[in-house]
Image (cartoon, rainbow, N blue to C red):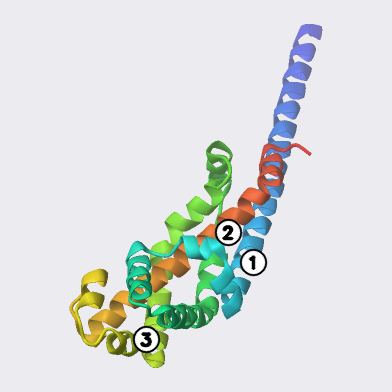
Amino acid sequence: MKRNTILVATMAIATLGTTTQSCLALATSSVGLAVLKQILLGGITKGLNIFSDKDSFMANQLIDAALPQQLRDLNNTLQKLGLNSLVEKEKQYIAQAAAFTVETSRPILVNAVNSLTAEDAARIVQGGSGAATQILKERTSEQLMAAIAPKVDAKLNEFGLVSSLNSALQGSNILGSILGTQNSTNSLTGGISRFASEQMVNGLFNIIQSHEQQNASTIMNSLNGTK
């Protein structure tokens, strides 16, 4: 009888211990995920605040690093032709267009962050610094491009960017050959808009990733349940 009682008690203690560990693991996971989300949301806010200000957008190195090669080649060609002022105007127009994408991009990114799960957190722990941004990028890049490209296209059309470029290049096919499009106003505007949108999306993720990396130790400690 005593032996049975001891066995039952031992099993009860083991079960209680397992349950306690599970609860602690769940609590740690929940707290860690909340910290992760808060940091990512901070990175999104930081990036979108930069997008909201033309001068900040133009001066940001992480956004400049995201400039597609086609636009970089275009700018280099214009500068070789002595058209530095036109390059500056193009950059200003793209920066102004970026401000009109902020409220379109925000809910897409915020929803993606709020949808992160414990499984995502485990992947982030394994992937290390920058892994969280990579997950967001995988899940939202196409959606962001589809959402902001029409707005960028409309703004660049409104600013008459392609007309300015064509006038400066005197109707040559330089613009079309660099952008890989037909030499028509609609095709050229669409090409520039597409590449400008790519710069915005990738530049925004560069800023979010930088913010994540700056807070990497806090993220990893919270996800691993340490102080």
Asked whether disc 2 touches disc 1, contact meaning CB atoms under 8 Å apart, the reply is yes
Residue 146, above or below 12: below
**Nearer to us: label 3 or label 1:** 3
Amino acid type at image mark 1: Lys
Local crowd size for mark 2, using a 10 Å CA cut-off: few (<14), some (14–19), many (≥20): many
- 8 left or right of 75 in image: right
Local crowd size for mark 1, using a 10 Å CA cut-off: few (<14), some (14–19), many (≥20): some
Amino acid type at image mark 2: Ile
Amino acid type at image mark 3: Leu
Q: Residue at x 21, y 86 (%)?
A: 171
Residue placed under numbered mark 3 in the picture: 161
The disc at residue 208 is 2
In the picture, which quadrant includes the C terminus? top right
**Nearer to us: label 3 or label 2:** 3
Secondary structure of residue under mark 1: helix
Q: Quadrant of residue 164?
A: bottom left
> How many angstroms separate mark 3 from mark 1 (CA)?
28 Å
Query: In this orientation, which residue lies closer to the viewer: 40 or 15?
Result: 40
Between discs 3 and 2, the one toward the N terminus: 3
Between discs 2 and 1, the one toward the N terminus: 1
Query: In this orientation, which residue lies closer to the viewer: 217 or 88?
Result: 88
Q: Residue at x 55, y 78 (%)?
A: 103
The disc at residue 46 is 1
Secondary structure of residue under mark 3: helix
* Residue 139, image x, y percentages: 44, 58
- 22 left or right of 2 in image: left
Query: In this orientation, which residue lies closer to the viewer: 75 or 189?
Result: 75
